[in-house]
Image (cartoon, rainbow, N blue to C red):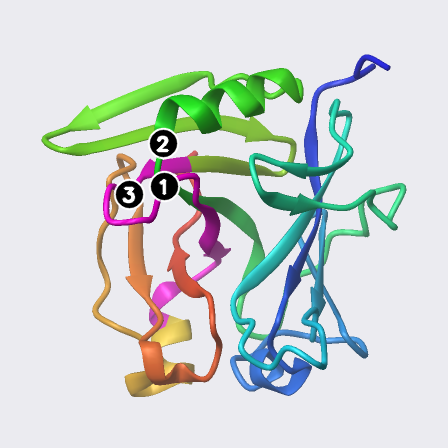
Amino acid sequence: MSATREPELAELAIADPPEAWAALGFDVDGENLDLGGVRVRLGGCDPDDGARRGITSWSLRGVNAMGQIDGLPSPVPRVLRPPPFATHPNGATGIDHVVVLTSDFNRTAAALKRAGMPLKRTREVGNLRQGFRRLGPAILEIVHSPEMSDSETSFWGLTVVVISLEALAERLGDRLGEIKPAVQPGRRIATLRADAGVSPAVAFMSPEPP
């Protein structure tokens, strides 16, 4: 069956306990965390597989995919409509982008196209190759990672939009890295340190300029 609307990110499952994200100032309801129209399901790992970490799956609306996309677990979304918008105590308002690493950029791009999500833009800087497209409330970023084993694709991390990076830095202290200019014009970014208590790579970014 063909997709009947533009594809959009509905859910992310992350294999962290809810309290780890609550400790960063997110408003967590049970195992759910809503970020700008995306439902984040925490504790999303198999309890018999304690080694699983980071983002373990995504769910998308409006795509031609059943179960997986180039090895990325892609279950049917349980949320039929985007959750209501809310600002979190740490100032978070939504997800700017989700990053996926791939051992074969062309293979992953082709799989996305078959699912109804062709890349809209590609970028090459030195040996770095990236691809982008919007998925409703967030952007998908594909990054070629030649260090990965053949046929491997994995979720790497996400960037969260916050109202004030300065206020967030005051709240998180040394758990947050230095605030720096972002690649996107007029925006700034700070990376959460690896020992901050969550398993995906996480960065925080200022809002898009008016």
For the residues labelled 1 and 3, the Cα–Cα distance comes to 10 Å
Residue at 33% x, 20% y: name it: 122
Magenta region includes residue 17: no
Q: Is residue 1 left or right of residue 53?
A: right
Looking at the picture, how far across and down is residue 13, in whole percent?
A: 67, 60
Residue type pointed to by label 3: Ser
* Badge number at residue 150: 1
* Residue 36 appears in view: no
Q: Secondary structure at mark 2?
A: loop
Image coords of residue 61 (percent x, y): 77, 33
Compared to residue 29, the image places residue 159 above or below, namely above
The boundaries of the magenta stretch are 142-166
Q: Which residue is mark 3?
A: 145
- Left or right: residue 171 versus residue 194 is right
- Total labels drawn: 3
In front here: 126 or 6? Answer: 126
Residue 150 in the image: above or below residue 40: above
Q: Which residue sits furthest front?
A: 150
